[in-house]
Image: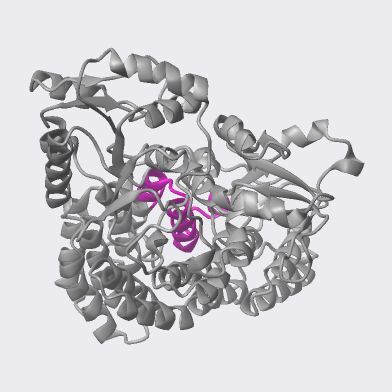
Amino acid sequence: MTAAQPDFAAAGDASALAFGVQARAEDLYGDAASAPALGRLSRALAEGGLRARASEKRLRERLKAALAHVRQNHFAAGAQGALEALKLDERNFLAWHILAICQEKSGQFGPALMAYEAALKLAPNETDIAQDLARLAERLGETGIAEKLLVRYLAANPGHVEATNNLACAYRNQRRYGEAVDLLRALLQIEPDKPVLWNTLGTVLSDQGEPGQAMVFFEEAIRLEPRFAKARYNRGNARQVLGDREGALEDLTDALAGADPGFERAMMTMARGMQLLALGRLAEGYPDYEARLDPAMPEAPRFVTPARRWRPDIEPAKGLRLLVTGEQGLADEMLFGSMLPDLRERLGPDGRLYVAVEPRLVGMFQRMLPDAVVGGHRSVRHQGRLHRLFPFLERVAPEAGPEAWIPMGSLMAPLRPDLSAFPTARGHLSADPDRVAYWRSELAALGPGLKIGLHWKSLVMTGSRARYFSSFERWRPVLTTPGCHMINLQCGDVATDLAEAEAAGVQIWTPPINLKNDLEDVAALSVAADLVIGPSVAGTNLAAACGARAWMIHAPDDWHRLGTETYAFYPGMRFMALAGFDGWPAALDLVRADLEAAVARGGFTD
């Protein structure tokens, strides 16, 4: 069978979709498998949207059967029915559309994209297909492509509520907040009773760090539709930032009860899990937190290994050959890494621990676990999904390799059942001692004064993530602290920030290393410095994990405090929780005051 070849030049490069990152989609409106959407497909089928041919009756039966499976959320069976229909007529757009819906709902995003494109190629005037494709594009982070599709759709269907809402989401996710607000307000003047528009208007304000103002719009959406799951979810997130954690949990639980199957349910389950963890209710939160690996989550990795998944609640650890793999980002691997020595002890002398981490961290983890087999994992994209591979295991004889595997974050339930099980030592990773000595001598050459390492932003600053970080300009009180040498540890392109600082007379020393890739040196330099300061990014986590003196400026909705006034993952680290997303000036003034105090007494006492 040869698929219809999609022509997508009018809407952008659709092939890029397979490499997108997960975008927030809790306020996108519409569902390809909703009852109204399936009703429209049924009507199209009944109205004879099939080519006349001898096999028409069999084709119609296959499509009806496929739709019946979709209505029952049996997406694998629905996809099989659509494929059988395509064997009879490979140019039937209904079959491609049904196949795309089933693949999307099954988490097969790459094939779903191609099937939607094929359907749209065959039926360019079927706007439901364009809408479904735009939603999937937005979910996978390809906002530009989604925007072009929606603009084209609205040109033919002006004032369409669903498409207008989703276009506003696309503008918001590109931080084009003014355009998003203008679009929504214009339609709200005509359609003031549409809760989805009020909800999305709230998310625009929330993304700009205004949760209090956003609450007004979420509450209006809920007033209009009391069981509106997305609005309750968003209100719960806003209540969390505003300090109402119990209210946030109530909203997230209510939202989950009305969530659509698939992505929405997985996303809301994970959010409730993190909220439970934020309240210190660990035993309740851990099961929900497992939703981060649900196949319905676009960025949930698939782990390529013949070993079985280890279930610590039913299989003892003693004597097991076990692979533990990092699953998310650098910071998470360092955060969860403190559990590995405890796990190694549980495996016993007859067990064997294999650890897969980001290649740049292999040396540090190997020093922590000298008798473990530590190697780098590798991630590749295939059919729109992230697959995690373990090439270092190819050097291990199959009979000696891992019998079972587990994602690193899933060790929390068996190894950190309550707060008393968290580490008490300052740091668990080990920086290279020779490199620490080298950097101490280099820092000494800068002259007298405290050596302060700085991080100030993330490498990913898209959409709502930007609200978690301050502009570099706001760091001026810290940068100008007398008696301190500022050390740039920030990876990425910071040339503009450093040039502005220099023009203002602020000297920031940048070490002659690659701050993104040379993590052994970054770790050693962090330990050699008197202090490392930054938000919750990989570099600040690296400093704390290696036992360096670290101050983390903490987002107001970060769950890692676990309902305490400490930071259980890094007991030696000081954290400063922002009172809100607008709390950066106060936090940085506090940092300046405490640095001045340290300079006055000749160093730090902690």
Q: Nearer the viewer, residue 536 or 581?
A: 536
Please give the name of the residue rendered at 38% of the width and 78% of the height, measured from the top-left corner: 249
44 in magenta: no
One can see residue 434 in this view: yes
Rendered location of residue 17, percent (x, y): 51, 43
Rendered location of residue 192, percent (x, y): 19, 77
* Magenta segment: 120-149
Looking at this view, name the residue that lies furthest to the right. 399
Most frequent secondary structure within the magenta stretch: helix
Q: Is residue 420 above or below residue 64?
A: above
Q: Quadrant of residue 247?
A: bottom left
On-image quarter of the C terminus? top left
One can see residue 263 in this view: no
Q: Is residue 179 above or below residue 592?
A: below
148 in magenta: yes
Q: Is residue 526 above or below residue 107?
A: above
For the image, the number of numbered tags is: 0
Rendered location of residue 63, percent (x, y): 70, 70
| 308 to the left or right of 22 | right
Please give the name of the residue rendered at 55% of the width and 43% of the height, measured from the top-left corner: 18
Please give the name of the residue rendered at 83% of the width and 55% of the height, measured from the top-left corner: 319
